[in-house]
Image: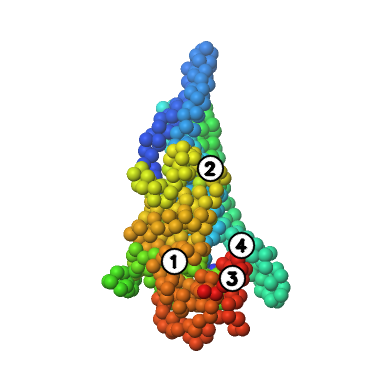
């Protein structure tokens, strides 16, 4: 059975080197100084290689063979002493190497994290562990592989240059024998680079596919047995294993070609030199020059070529595959199709366009699950203060997540400023604060400026005064004082997060019980401060006093909703009357909502009260929800 997606994989691997090279050029261009300093230290290795063979040749021709052993010993000493500066240069080489390697890893990690965040915003349900692997495992592979490749390539270039310069100084005709096998072997080796990288990618892909299938099958053994899908699972495992074996064999075949290239480069030049030695000696080559040439070949050229080819064969292909995975462009968000025209924003009364809008939005947590939101229509105008209330489990946090673009609806459309929600717009349109505030170790100033790094001290001071952060600031001592999350109360954490959102001042602020740990006075102060901002405010309220401060209130009871002012809802919504502590039954008139009068999926004649509930008895939907925590007062 042929593996799926063969054509796309072929197209991707054919362009892998092009994509990596395109990204590598600006990276290296920005570090030209580092490369030049690395080359400067490597010149000592050039000198060592040159003097190694040249000193041996001079020691024989002008020393031992000429009857002057002291001269021969001096030349050998020169060749030996040349090793010391090259060893001392190692420190300088590794110092410059860090300046070239660490920025690569940092850049790859930033790219992976940025892609993960943008992908999570665009497709929350499609988040995978790929980015985690890139940040931890693959970035380290790239870092180590790049460091090894730079060291080996640097050594190869300056060693070969020193050996070629030495051969030219001894006898230029030596190059006629030495260079042809080197060029042939190098050409054969370079011809295997792209196919080896492609086979390496195929092998890694097949290995990942088999591992993913095995892990999923191991986790679902009970379901596989219950559904009678054992034969199908075994067949899929066999196909994936055969695909892995096929790619491994193909990789091994190309590895064999590479072994031949290594033999041509490393073994043929000394052999040809020995075979051509009689002809060279008859034509004026000195014995010392012959031994010096053999020294260059066996001690410098052959080890350098073999080291480079081994590095490229073992690390180069894997490095190319890993870097290519980092260069892959993330998939565009679902609503970001080029050329797609957004719907025109629906004007609200007064000619204002809504900041956020839900158009017949449906949301369910599974294909067969009951919808939490059922074709809900909602518009939030600029400067409006909307409160969302309802018992626990009624979908308030789900609504906040859908409105913020964190969860994608299963039906309908979510619009910001009249355009479909896009992950790229999230940080500029809205800020969402959950109940559990995020505070990191650092200064108070850094925490407050997290969403707006350019916030001035004047803006921070105004925010502290508006939200009432003075007690916290006084306790810490200053804005630059160290802030440790474990030493803050839950309410203080929420105040820090609220201050961060206040400074950001986005067009849409959503507080999902973000003031639940504050006392009523602090909560009132915070909500009034946000309501005074020009943007829209949506508050998932846990106290009814919070809802009464809003311009409109959305009452949620699962997919059934009602929207209006507090006065209107006291007349039209039995659930809101229950939340307000008024258990006196009342005949419900036709509801006034931000939705159409006919509520989808529900008969409007259905009463809100639970069947059989007596007058003055609280709705059983509220029991255990935390909304009713004391005995009901006397009916008003």
**Residue for point 59% across, 54% down:** 252
Q: Position of residue 188 (x, y in %)?
A: 49, 49
* Disc 1 to disc 3, C-alpha distance: 20 Å
The spot of residue 522 in percent (x, y) is 47, 53
Disc marking residue 212: 4
Q: Is residue 281 in view?
A: no
Q: Which residue is mark 1?
A: 548
Q: Which residue is mark 2?
A: 484
Q: Please give the residue where the numbered disc 3 appears in the rendered image.
A: 632
Q: Which label belongs to residue 151?
A: none
Q: Look at the numbered disc 1 and give the secondary structure of its residue.
A: helix
Distance between mark 4 and mark 3 Cα atoms: 55 Å
| Residue placed most toward the observer, 69 or 497 | 497
- Secondary structure beneath dot 3 equals loop
Q: Within the image, what quadrant is residue 283 found in?
A: top left
Viewer-proximal residue, 501 or 79?
A: 501
Image-based side of 306 in relation to 210, left or right: left
In the depicted view, which residue is nearer to us: 291 or 566? 566
């Amino acid at each position: 059975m042929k593996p799926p997606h063969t054509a796309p994989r072929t197209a991707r691997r054919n362009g892998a080197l092009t994509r990596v090279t395109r990204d590598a050029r600006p990276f290296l261009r920005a570090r030209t100084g580092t490369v030049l300093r690395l080359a400067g230290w490597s010149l000592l290795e050039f000198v060592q290689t040159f003097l190694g063979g040249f000193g041996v040749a001079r020691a024989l021709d002008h020393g031992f063979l000429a009857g002057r052993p002291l001269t021969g010993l001096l030349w050998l000493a020169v060749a030996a002493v040349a090793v010391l500066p090259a060893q001392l240069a190692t420190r300088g080489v590794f110092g410059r190497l860090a300046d070239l390697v660490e920025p690569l890893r940092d850049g790859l990690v930033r790219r992976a994290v940025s892609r993960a965040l943008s992908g999570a915003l665009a497709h929350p349900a499609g988040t995978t562990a790929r980015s985690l692997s890139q940040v931890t495992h693959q970035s380290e592979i790239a870092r180590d592989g790049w460091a090894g490749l730079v060291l080996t390539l640097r050594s190869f270039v300056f060693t070969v240059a020193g050996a070629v310069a030495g051969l030219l100084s001894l006898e230029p005709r030596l190059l006629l024998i030495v260079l042809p096998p080197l060029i042939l072997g190098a050409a054969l080796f370079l011809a295997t680079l792209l196919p080896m990288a492609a086979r390496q990618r195929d092998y890694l892909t097949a290995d990942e596919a088999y591992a993913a299938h095995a892990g999923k099958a191991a986790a679902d053994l009970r379901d596989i047995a219950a559904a009678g899908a054992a034969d199908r699972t075994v067949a899929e495992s066999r196909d994936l294993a055969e695909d892995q074996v096929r790619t491994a064999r193909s990789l091994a075949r190309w590895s064999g070609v590479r072994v031949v290239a290594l033999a041509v480069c490393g073994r043929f030049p000394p052999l040809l030199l020995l075979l051509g030695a009689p002809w060279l000696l008859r034509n004026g080559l000195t014995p010392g020059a012959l031994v010096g040439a053999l020294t260059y070949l066996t001690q410098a050229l052959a080890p350098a070529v073999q080291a480079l080819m081994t590095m490229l064969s073992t690390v180069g292909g894997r490095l190319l595959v890993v870097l290519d995975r980092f260069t892959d462009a993330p998939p565009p968000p679902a609503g970001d199709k080029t050329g797609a025209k957004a719907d025109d924003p629906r004007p609200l009364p007064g000619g204002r366009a809504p900041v956020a809008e839900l158009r017949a939005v449906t949301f369910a947590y599974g294909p067969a699950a009951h919808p939490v939101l059922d074709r809900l229509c909602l518009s939030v105008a600029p400067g409006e203060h909307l409160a969302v209330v309802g018992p626990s489990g009624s979908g308030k946090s789900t609504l906040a997540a859908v409105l913020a673009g964190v969860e994608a609806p299963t039906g309908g459309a979510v619009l910001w400023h009249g355009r479909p929600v896009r992950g790229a717009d999230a940080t500029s349109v809205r800020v969402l604060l959950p109940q559990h505030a995020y505070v990191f170790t650092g200064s108070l100033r850094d925490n407050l400026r997290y969403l707006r790094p350019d916030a001035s001290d004047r803006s921070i001071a105004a925010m502290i005064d508006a939200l009432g952060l003075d007690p916290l600031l006084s306790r810490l001592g200053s804005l630059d004082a160290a802030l440790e999350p474990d030493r803050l109360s839950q309410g203080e954490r929420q105040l820090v997060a609220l201050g961060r959102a206040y400074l950001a001042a986005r067009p849409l602020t959503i507080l999902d019980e973000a003031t639940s740990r504050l006392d009523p006075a602090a909560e009132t102060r915070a909500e009034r401060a946000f309501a005074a901002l020009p943007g829209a405010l949506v508050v998932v309220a846990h106290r009814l006093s919070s809802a009464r401060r809003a311009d409109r209130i959305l009452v949620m009871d699962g997919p059934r909703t009602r929207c209006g002012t507090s006065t209107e809802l006291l007349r039209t919504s039995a659930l809101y009357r229950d939340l307000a502590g008024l258990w006196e039954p009342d005949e419900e008139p036709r509801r006034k909502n931000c939705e159409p009068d006919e509520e989808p999926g529900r008969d409007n004649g259905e009463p809100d009260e639970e069947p059989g509930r007596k007058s003055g008895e609280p709705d059983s939907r509220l029991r255990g929800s935390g909304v009713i925590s004391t005995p009901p007062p006397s009916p008003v």
